[in-house]
Amino acid sequence: MRTVVFVGAGHTHLHALRAWARRPPANARLVVISESSVSTYSGMLPGVLAGQYSRDAMEIDVVGLCRAAAAELIIGRWTGLDRERRVLHIEGHDDRSFDVASIGIGSIPTFRGVTVTDPSRLVPVKPMVTFLDRLDHRLLTAQRERSGRPLRIAVVGGGAGGVELALCLPPHVDLQLGGGALCERTLITGGSQLVPGAPPRAAALSWQACVRAGVRVVRGRRVAGVDGTALTLSDGTTVDADIVLWATTAVATPALASLGLPTDARGFPLTLDTLQVISGHPIFVVGDSGTVVAARLPKAGVTAVREGPVLWRNLQRLLSERPLVCYRPRRKFLQLLNTGDGQAIADWRGWSCKGTWCWRLKNVIDRRFVAKFRLEGLRPHVRGRLIARAARR
């Protein structure tokens, strides 16, 4: 029996895990290493903050998926890998050998060039699976410190994620701190526009949504320092903040350096367009964790989702010693940004608009995605077959 190991339970691995449950490869066993028993779907986090979903609506049961696939689940933190000996290191567990490994552990926030003298007010968005717990803890602490004045929240990062956080926060603050809790929001971006890379129309709609929602936007200035009471910007000005939500560009986790492979400027291992590492070892690096040399794709959830079918096909091909297939990314895809007011901003091939129907479309897409990975969402005969198969193993 050959051992396949998934390190991480992100979007790419969820697809492969679901496919494994339906049609497991012959003479192979699966081990999943995850720091949490649930996986968080990032696309629904803004909706949870806006009160449009309950928290469990965005969570996927990793334990249940592993049970359906008859996979061994290890709850622990992966700390490194010996690619020559094919051994994985897991904090608090014995080393595990593997025949094929796939690494998809996401990324971590970067504070490069930022002087942080007091991190107590910082709440990085990643890791997303613990974000709400860390946010709620900081909200309760800040409530005791604010002495009746409105809560001051700064969101650092003007990408789609940062814009959604700034727009969708108030209902969650109100829920956690009680009715009537006021918050002042400031969105800080080093770029000249919001949502870098978006068409001008989509960027303008994001700006207008922030203005209507009362979000102060600071453009063209980066955060240079974080102390106990304020952020210092690159031009020397300061922004008072009780809570700082950090949603900037991320970098690779230190554990990825153990691979000893060539990386991009942010430390992400370089892979072929088959998602396999360029050294030729039987290791895949997927989602935010890797950078496809031929594509240099954005670190986005949609990229990780679309890599899922390619990883699954290549796992089977590698196990059966067949040539691997290439990932052919689509450069244009539908982007939907939740504005927290029952509407969303849609961008499709440069055509952008904002409306209720955009939110409804996003809601359908997101709910369908999560439902794919829930046993109760399957047809009864399919669900029964998976459960029976897992019991036989």
Image (cartoon, grey):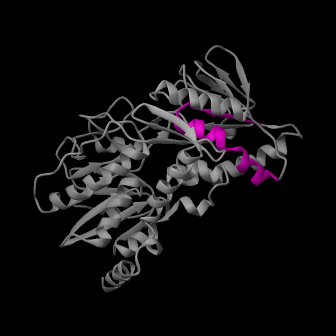
x then y, percent, for residue 170: 72, 44
The quarter of the picture where the N terminus appears is bottom left
Quarter of the image for residue 5 reads bottom left
Which residue sits furthest right?
A: 148
Inspect this view and state whether residue 303 appears.
yes
x then y, percent, for residue 70: 34, 75
Indicate whether residue 3 is drawn in magenta: no
Residue 2 in the figure: left or right of residue 387: left
Residue drawn 23% across the image and 44% down it: 277
x then y, percent, for residue 39: 48, 59
Indicate whether residue 171 is drawn in magenta: yes
As drawn, 22 above or below 16: below
As drawn, 112 above or below 63: above
The mark tally for this picture is 0
Inspect this view and state whether residue 112 appears.
no
Residue 197 in the figure: left or right of residue 342: left
Q: Which residues are magenta?
A: 152-178
Q: Main secondary structure of the magenta part?
A: helix
Residue drawn 25% across the image and 71% down it: 24
